[in-house]
Image (tube, grey):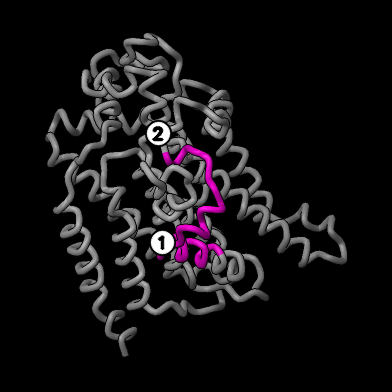
Amino acid sequence: MWKQLFKKNYIFVYGLFFLSLLFYLAFTKIGGDGDFWWLMALGRHWWETGQVTNYDMLSHTFPHGYFWNHSRLFDIIVYGLFAWGKYLALDIFRFFLFIGTYFFLYKTISLPAIPADAGIGKSLGKNRHNILVTFIMLALTLWFLADRLLYRPELFSMLLSAILLFLLFKDKQKASKFTWLVPILQLIWANSHAGFVYGLAMIGIFFGAEVIRSLLRHRDNTLEIIKDKRLKKLVLIFILSILATCLNSYGWQIYVLAYKLTLPQEALSGIAEWGKYSWQNLFNFLNPLAILFCLSILVLIFKIYQLTRSTPTVASACLAGRQATSPLDPRVGGEGGDREGVLIKLQHYPSAYAENWVV
């Protein structure tokens, strides 16, 4: 009954979804995010000079030091909007980023399921997801985003992740020419946020899954997989995506910089999401977010063949990932919180915080 009700009143569903997001975002504010002013300064530099900087132009203790500005495009857009319409323009921009993210998540969930024994490009199944449950699950993810309602480049990663998932699943359901837009998405992503590596990982996962499917179909003659058109298409898209990400001010060095972020760095000791994780803390400080994250990963592993039916749970895990992993960080939840990391930064990099105020 509920499913038919929502099918006949899809305008109501989208309208309610739109209003819920508007209500939620209307009660947000900038808060004490020092990174926002850093991004604004970098964006202003481009608008005034027309150049993208690869050095730390704001530092007083280490002037012109080389650094990775992985959010160039986002910085330019944010400052341009701010100069034009102040915070109202930024609020509207952020709002549509969220709307776009949820729209493509919902469209991905709504794709018809593909039976395990169906051939390539055949969509013989029906979408079995419950619209009401899907709506509730997606709405609940708003709560996980309570700490992400800032003007941060991560917003681009959220939107582009949702679009990429939709394009890949759409092509799996039925061959689509729009899949060739993936390299363009990766080009935009690589110039907007370091999360572009997740896009490559998703493409790689789809490629690996297709290789396994092709091997199973041609188990009698594995050389037949060479003739697999979808496999060739994914390989070419993957290669083009890698090449597209190199179209930035760092070139192929962008991968070296991304790798260096995984290495121990004292300057990053106060940044929770870039720090080391302690799996022991997972058992000492379990909370609903961590439990949801772990359960969602299990759903993803054991139901990968019907991902379109379990996407609400997976989407919840993706959106809550930053929050859910915080218990794994040895600096979060313990005595003194993150003050130790802050003190280290102040001792060795005294201008690390002061220069944010100078901007």
Give me the C-alpha separation between circle 1 and circle 2. Answer: 25 Å
Which residue: 24% across, 28% down? 37
Residue under pointer 1: 289
56 in magenta: no
Give the left or right position of residue 4, taking residue 295 as reference. Answer: left
- Check contact, mark 1 vs mark 2: CB within 8 A: no
Q: In the rendered structure, which disc, 1 or 2, sits on the residue that comes first in sequence?
A: 1
Q: Say which quarter of the image contains residue 59.
A: top left
Q: What is the magenta segment's predominant secondary structure?
A: helix
Q: Position of residue 148 (x, y in %)?
A: 31, 48
Who is closer to the viewer here, 73 or 30?
30
Task: Determine whether 164 is above or below 358 in the image.
Answer: below
Residue 146 x/y as whole percent: 28, 54
Q: Is residue 274 magenta?
A: yes
- Tell me: residue 312, above or below residue 4: above
Q: Secondary structure at mark 2?
A: helix
Amino acid type assigned to the residue bearing label 1 in the image: Leu
Residue 77 visible in the displayed image: no
Which residue lies at the image location 45% right of the left edge and 15% below the top edge?
66
- Depth check, mark 1 against mark 2: the one in front is 2
Residue located beneath label 2 in the image: 340
